[in-house]
Every structure is written in structure tokens, then in C-alpha cells.
Amino acid sequence: MTTFRKLSLTTTLVLSSFLMSGCATGGAGMVGSSSNVKYGDAKAAETVTADFGSTDLQSTAETLTQSLLESRYIAKAQKPPKVRLRAVNNLTYEHIDTKAITDKIRIKLLKSGQVRFLADTANLNQVNSERDLTTAATTKTKMKAMTDSDYIITGNVRSIKKANDDVKDVYYNVSMELVDPQSGEILWADEKEIRKVTAKSSVGW
Amino acid sequence: MANKLTILSCSLFCALQLGATTLDSDTLRSSLSKPQFEQTLATLSADTSDQDEFWYWLNLARLQQANGDFNSSIHSFQKSFEILDEYENRAKVSLRNVGSFLGSAFLSKGAESYYGKGYERTLMHTLNALNYTMLGNFEGAAVEMRRMEQRQEFWLSETEEKIKEAAEEKAKAEKSGSGDLSSMPSGYTMASMLEDPSVRNLANSYQDPFSYTLSSIISSIAFPHENLGEVSLKRALTLNPDVSKVFVTLPPSMKSALKSPVQPAKGKKAAKGKKGGETPKIEKMEITIVILSGEAPSVKIEKIRFPLFNGANYTSIDLPAFNPPINDISVVTISTEKLRLQPPRLLQTNAMAYKTLKDELIGELSKAVVRATTKAVVAKQASDNFGFLGGLVASLAMDAGSSLADSGFRNWELLPNSGYLSKFEAFKGETFTITMNDRQESFTLPKDKKGVLVLVSYLTNDNIRIDHVAY
């Protein structure tokens, strides 16, 4: 009887721990494997909706960065110019986080080593506050160096939407410009065009 | 133990009740005054039974906005936008749309799901733009205004189609000699309202000068160096010449006084960097005041019952109608130190609602005739087979069934009925007053900003909230 009880207890414990481990982990270093979450390729084309998405963000940043780096003002500069990247205006029909576009472009440009970046206007106040705390770095020359940029990059995202009973067409145009802040001259400009078309199904729920 | 069980069961019951509570249209509209507002908002937020309805999220969004909870209001507007987007992108032959059409054609108007009329769909974006504005996100607000303008363009073609269909129906009816559908049925309470000059004089049922004017103002704040709002302003002026009264500047005499040299006070040293006689920076700022007041007409299904030729059976023509707007204000006055303004009522939701109904009435009437005929045939069959009482019971059962279905047919009942706009110049730091009917509210301007946009949410005479954003 005692042997039987021990056997029952052991079986129960083994089964419980097996079930619990099954619920909590699915293998070494993996949590929640029973859920439907999966990792996907971050570079894969995303076509869930016709809205501005991750693929558009990546291709825009790639195209415009490459074009800018090839421009003579950057490629043939004696030393990496100081650049300030302004916010990209969202002139579309969607709530696009345009900061994601500028951040991606900034990272790509910085990684190239061909430009230096100054803090954007929004961050400048925070940088100034930090500087005020350090007495060593409050000379006017350094302050001027922080605010003077060789070039300014600005941009716009626009879209045109058309739809009829069968088809919805969205056209995006992301344009950027490199401007000389002293003269106001536009030194470089390029654009990335994206077109997305969705068709309505004939019969459905 | 028994006590614990009682508490537990009571809590469970309360939770279930709260989850199941649905505010009907009349209760919702009559529970907006200050003492009831919090409870109304909580009950509506907790209502899970209507969350797939377009109007539910719109009602909730207005209350959240009037409560100053702009993020939640954006979320609710987004939900209603998603419901509408799903509806507009359905398959060309959608089984749901077919079912809804058949149900509304033969059984009851209430079988239709409500996806809003043109003016509600556009005002959804206008009100959401105000949420973004109040959060200081003018670019986001401009996106919503662009959506509003695009929807109006879309609605233009859709309305033209409906007017064309109505004309065809009318021609067909005249040809077949089945009566003049354009004449209102006797006993229809909306008849005189739909012929009101304010309704007849509207250019169309969906374009409102309020949204276009606000769009132009928001564009000028979001993108001050580009004239993106000019087209919107021209459209607004075409729709209502009173738009020109929205923009008021300080009198020229005041401007010259502002620009005159300021001498330092006697015995006081001039401020560092400012010498006596130097022209100071003009200490004026631009103020935009948006007043959203009252609640728009709420939709209802009106039954005009009439007896059939024999027996006690009867049928009914059921047509959409409106309960009148509530809690609105009739006059607004804004007083500053130098100006006294009466901003025009640019948003006239009741007129747009009645105009929409007037445009669609012929189509609605033809559907109502089909429904009445279906009911009459069923009642006649019941009368023939089961006698006098059978006909009456069949008539009563169909009447009760359709009334039940119609009670769930609701629109955006908390949409503001009026919108007033004013953009004027004032001195930094001064206090101005807004008088709405007999209520007077004061607001003191900041001293260090270029402009201020003030949103006044007037739900009832005792439930007014003023929010502002400076830029």
C-alpha cells in the first residue's frame, strides 16, 4: 500500500512538473512558445494594409541616404560637414511618425562617417540644459559651434489617395532637400515615390 | 461565510449589470448635466454590448473630449474610423450588406446597421482634429482635417449618386402612376421642418463651413510658412459668407499705439538691452476660440399607422425622423479689453441632418411602401386563414417586432449641434470673457506665447469645460 501511495505521489509530481514546464517554457531560453507570436524578417516586404509601413520606411531611408551621400557636397567635402536634420513634415492623410524616417536616415548617415550631426531643435534645449550644468563648456565659441551647421536637411511626405468602387490607389512622395543655411540655396534634393494599390474582392462577408 | 457569499454574489451581479448596462438614446441625452456626467461617462465606457456600432464610439469620443481626456477621445474616434473603414472596403457583393438591404427593404428600417451620414463622417475628423490640437500636435490635427476634406470629396460623388437614384425613383413612380413620392405622407412630423428655409438654402447636406474654416486655421498654425489653408478658407466662404466675420484684428489705432516708442518709467533704469525710444516687440497675440455646443438631433423611426380595407388588421409606413436638438445656445459674445465679438454659428448640424433626410426621403419612402405592403400581405393572409383576430394579432406582432428592431437604430446623438469660431487679436496676459446664453466664462491669456487656441465644450448649461493650448 505504501509503495502504491509513493508511486502515485511520484507520478503526480512528475506529471505536474511536466505540465507546468510545458505551460511556461518550450525549451531552453524560450518563454511562451505556446502563443502565436513569431519572429519575422525585419526586411521582408510588409503588405498588411496600404498605409505607410515598415517597408516604405526602410526603402525611403535607403534611397535618400544613398543619394545624399553621393552628392558632391557630401562625397567631395574636405571634412565631414556638420548637418542638422529638421523634422519631416507630414502632409499625408495618415498619422505617420515622421521622426522614424529622420531617425533612420540619421543613423545611416552617421554610420557612413561622411557627415557629423548636430542635435535637432527639439533636442537643443535639453543639450543646452546639460551644458549649463558644466561650467567648463560654456564659452561662447563652443556655444556657437553647437548651433552653427554647414547644412540643413528638410523634407516632406505627401500622399495622393484615389478610390473607386473597385480599386484604392495611394501614392506617397517623400522628398528631402539639403539647404545652405547661410545663402538659403538648395544644394541637393531627391525624392522617393511609392505607389500602393488595393483591389476590393468581388464577393465576401 | 454567508456574508462573504452575499458580498461576492452582489459584486458579481453589479459587475455583470455594469457590463450589461446600455444607455438608450433618451437616457444618454438626458444625463449630461454636471451631477450625472461622471456616471454617464463611466456607464458608457463600460458598455460592451454596442462596441461594434459606429455611433457608440462617436458618442463616447464626444464625452471624453468634453471631459478633457483627449487621448481616450482619439482612441474612440480611431475605433469608429476603423468600423467605417471596414464598411467602406467590403467586397463589392458583401453578404452582410445584402442581408441588411433585404432586412431594411422588407422587414424594418432598424435591420440596417448605421454607418453615419456624410456630415457625421466628416465631423468625426473635425472633432478628432481638435483632440490633436489640444495635445499640441498640430501636424496630427492637420492630418485629420485633410481626411475631413477628402471624405467630403468622396461624399460629393456618393450624394450625387443618391440624388440621381431619387430622381429615377420619382420618374419611375410618376410613369407607373403609383403616386407622387416627393410629397410627404400626412402625419409625418418632419414635413414642415424639411421645408424650412434654413434647410432649403443649404448648398448640400455634408459640407460645413465650420470644418473648412477650422482646417484653414489649423494649417496656418501647423505650417506657418506655407499657405496650405487658403483653399479651405475659400471653400468655407463660398458655403457661408459669415466666415469673414470669424477673423477680427485689433483696430488700426490700437496697432499704432502698440508700435509707438515706450519710454522707461521715471526714476527707473531702462532694461538691459533696451534703450528708451526703442520700438518694443508688439505684445499682441492671436486667439482662436472654438465653441462646440448642444447635442444634434437624434434619429428615430416614426410609424404612420393606417388600417387595411377589411378587418382589424393594419400596417404602417415607417420613416426615419429626428428628435430635436437639445442643450444648445442661441448667442455667443466674446469681450476683450478692446473688442466685442459675436462669432457666427458656422456649424449647423440640425440643418445638415434635415437636409440629408430631405435628400434621401424619396428613397426611404419607396422602401417604406415595400415594407408596409409586406406587412399588409402577411396581415391579410392571417386574417383570411384565422379570421378577424388572426389579422389583428399578425399586425400587432409585426408592429412590435419592427419597433424592437427600430429601437436599436441610432445615430451620433452627442454630436455638437452648433459650432462657433472666432479668431482675433488680443494683448498678451489680458482676460477675456465668453458669454453663452446666460453663462459667462473668463479666460486669462498667457504672456509668453504667440497664440492660443481655446476649446469650449458646452454639453449643458451647467456642464461647460474650457481647455486651451498655447503655441
Image (cartoon, rainbow, N blue to C red):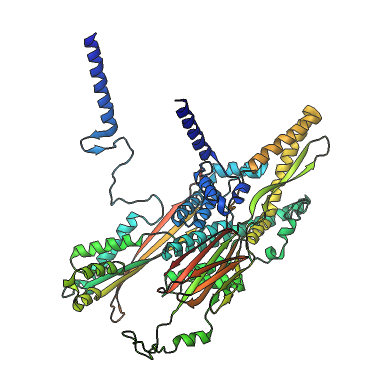
Across and down, in percent, residue B64 comes to 50, 54
Going by the picture, which residue comes out furthest to the bottom?
B277
> In which quadrant of the rendered view does residue B272 lie?
bottom left
Along the line of sight, the residue nearer the viewer: B433 or A62: B433
B141 with respect to A142 (left or right)? right
> In which quadrant of the rendered view does residue B108 lie?
top right
As drawn, B333 above or below B388: below
> In which quadrant of the rendered view does residue B344 lie?
bottom right
* Residue B345 visible (yes or no): yes
As drawn, A19 above or below B455: above
B403 with respect to A163 (left or right)? right
Along the line of sight, the residue nearer the viewer: A134 or B182: A134
Q: Write the residue at 25% across / 34% down.
A: A25
Along the line of sight, the residue nearer the viewer: B200 or A62: B200
* Residue B216 visible (yes or no): no
Quadrant occupied by the C terminus of chain B: bottom left
Across and down, in percent, residue B320 comes to 67, 50
Along the line of sight, the residue nearer the viewer: A158 or A14: A14
Going by the picture, which residue comes out furthest to the top?
A1
How many callouts does the rendering have? 0
Across and down, in percent, residue B182 comes to 74, 56
As drawn, B251 above or below B130: below
Across and down, in percent, residue B465 comes to 52, 60
Q: Write the residue at 70% across / 47% down.
A: B302
Going by the picture, which residue comes out furthest to the front?
B267
Quadrant occupied by the N terminus of chain B: top left
